[in-house]
Image (cartoon, helix red, strand yellow):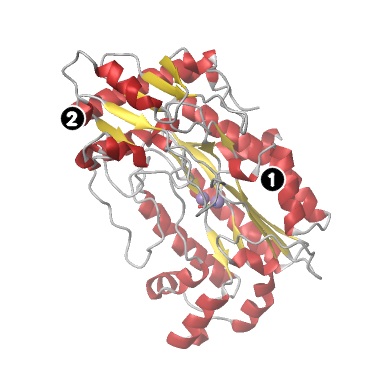
Amino acid sequence: MASEYKPHYAAHIAELQRRWEAALEEEGLQAALVHSGTPMYSFQDDYQYAFRPNPNFLAWLPLTQQSDSTLLIVPGERPHLVYFQPVDYWYLPPSDPESWWADQFDVEVVRNADGWRAALDNKLAGRSLAARDIAAIGDSPSLADVFRPERINPDGLVTRLHLARTRKTPYEVACIEEAAGLAAVAHCEAERAFREGESEFNIHQRYLSACEHSDAQLPYGNIVALNSHGAVLHYQGRERSVPAEIHSFLLDAGCTVNAYASDITRTYATGAGEFADLVQAMNTLELDLVGRVRAGLDYKELFLQSHLEIAAILKSFDIIRADAETAVESGLSSVFYPHGLGHFLGLQTHDVAGLIDNDGTAIPRPDGHPALRLTRVLEAGNTLTIEPGLYFIEPLLQAWRETNDPAVINWSKVEQLMPSGGIRIEDNVLVTDNGCDNLTRRAFAEV
Ligand code: GLY
Ligand code: MN
Ligand code: MN
């Protein structure tokens, strides 16, 4: 199935070392300390929120539950990992470092959550480097006790590190590819559950068990939407009961491998008919858009194209009565397609640096499109989603009716399609010099 990530790990670490050394030098910094994060507790309680480490730590280490650990990056030296491994009998402590990743680091095990401070002092003893002059990356409150405020997450360094993360290494691509493979297996199981007439809740459980993920391991909360729930873009409900009639199913769900995400959406119609035809048209459009992805493509241009093409689909199905250009200019296409075409994908589902160019300057979104998350010119090594959508969203339709010309919408057609909610088709792609590799379609083909 998916390619194996372990053989690429040493080269990944070497590449990160080069990138971080360059970023430190450009920012006039001598070293950086990355803190994995400190768990947060519910108010006046002794239970923690689900813990997610700092993504800048995860970029180096496949340690998705490792709190209160630090990585010290000093140019010319092996990275130094302070690994928090308490002696505990209330909770299971982290297991011993595993050689496939630990061999790339100097590893020092500490038993206390603030053990990294003494470890850092020891590491710096006898050098001209002082902790106060090192940049710290992370959100642990403990950083403020050691570092000067202007040294914690300095903008210049953070921007350089974010930009570096847009170009995935072969290790990262292999992780995302495997996450796409797992999600494809689980999507197929979820489709079976839908065809068997299961509830949203049960479909979700079948998804989890097929990919052997807990809820907390998912990159984002699964969107498991029957019927009109598909029109709620980030629908988070999980109805336990089965609707009396089932028209459609929209599933937006991914998996993680070493914290790298996949983010995949499929939409199904229960039977033949106009909604099924619309799903088919959107699928054709999505593949067509993916076919245009390559290094050098301006993503916001592709996004604007997708608006024109969705407007053309709306017109050809007699849902709107305006030509595509007018529909886009007037904002009518946004009533049916109110989100962006996609986003970078990586350690974060909506991965970083989608809205800046290579010198860190903001690239504005096109007017009237506040939800677009990616405005860059694409480069080889970018991983991103292509996810056009078409929905029947009551509040947006209502707002159009109240403030614009209602005659440009065929309301009886809208009423007929409304119970099916909406359509989104979402694939994950790797940009190459000559095109792109559609990781999602390949994963489905292999299931
Ligand atoms: N699943 C969230 C998104 O597609 O962006
Ligand atoms: Mn997405
Ligand atoms: Mn998605």
Q: Position of residue 31 (x, y in %)?
A: 24, 25
Q: Position of residue 104 (x, y in %)?
A: 43, 14
Residue 112 is tagged as none
**Residue beneath the point at 19% across and 21% down:** 129
Relative vertical location of residue 340 with respect to residue 383 in this rendering, above or below: below
Q: How many neighbours does mark 1 have within 10 angstroms: few (below 14), some (14-19), or many (20 or more)?
A: many
**Residue beneath the point at 52% across and 69% down:** 336
> Pointers 1 and 2 in contact (CB under 8 A)?
no
Q: Quadrant of residue 297?
A: top left
Is the C terminus in the top left, top right, bottom left or bottom right quadrant?
A: top right
| Residue at disc 1, secondary structure | helix
Query: For this rendering, which residue is in front, 430 or 137?
Result: 137
Residue 26 is tagged as 2
Q: Position of residue 267 (x, y in %)?
A: 66, 56
Residue to which mark 1 is pinned:
187
Q: Does residue 139 appear in the picture of this structure?
A: no
